[in-house]
Image (cartoon, rainbow, N blue to C red):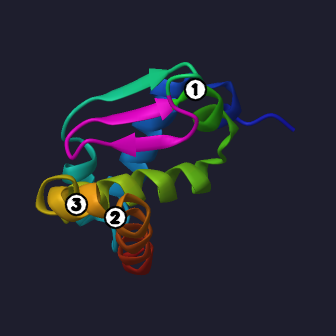
Amino acid sequence: MSTTFDKMTGEQRLTAVNVDLANHKTFAIMSGVACVGKNEIVPDAVCSTAGTNGRDVIWGESFLMSLTRKQLRFVVLHESFHKALRHCSEYIEVSKREPEATNIAMDYVVNAFI
């Protein structure tokens, strides 16, 4: 069974999920952060999943289109918490020294919030 969400473009899916977050009693506070910067959908060769530079979010097209609405809400929240917690600006030096460990630690913190 095909749903309306399944028929949406990537941009439409991101908009729908941002509306979902704005209407959610727990996560509405993050909807403003989710709307900061731009969302760029790129070919899979450029980005295979999703990531943020602290303002903008880049989305691998196949990854974005493969997610259910619930999964996409999680990833939007995940990237938004990276922004809110300033992971891309506060941890530059340690990220240079220990990139993998730093990424794992930041993801652990973000996922614990969600």
Q: Is residue 111 left or right of residue 71?
A: left
- Give me the C-alpha separation between circle 3 and circle 1: 24 Å
Q: Residues within 10 Å of mark 1 (few under 14, many from 20)?
A: many
- Give me the C-alpha separation between circle 1 and circle 2: 29 Å
Q: Which residue is mark 2?
A: 98
The quadrant where residue 90 appears: bottom left
Q: Which residue is mark 3?
A: 87
Among the two numbered marks 1 and 2 on one chain, the one whose residue lies closer to the N terminus: 1
Image quadrant occupied by the N terminus: top right
- Give me the C-alpha separation between circle 2 and circle 3: 14 Å
Give the answer, above or below, for where 114 lies relative to 87.
below
Please give the name of the residue rendered at 27% of the width and 53% of the height, measured from the top-left corner.
31
User: Dots 3 and 1: beta carbons under 8 Å?
Assistant: no
User: Dots 1 and 2: beta carbons under 8 Å?
Assistant: no
* Closer to the camera in the image, 25 or 108: 108
Secondary structure beneath dot 3 equals helix
Residue 27 place in picture, x, y as percent: 33, 67
Q: Nearer the viewer, mark 1 or mark 2?
A: 2
- Amino acid carrying label 1: it is Glu
Among the two numbered marks 2 and 3 on one chain, the one whose residue lies closer to the N terminus: 3
Please give the name of the residue rendered at 65% of the width and 44% of the height, measured from the top-left corner.
67
Residue 56 place in picture, x, y as percent: 26, 36
Q: Residues within 10 Å of mark 2 (few under 14, many from 20)?
A: few
Q: Nearer the viewer, mark 2 or mark 3?
A: 2
Q: Which residue is mark 1?
A: 61
Image quadrant occupied by the C terminus: bottom left
The magenta region covers 47-59
The quadrant where residue 35 appears: top left
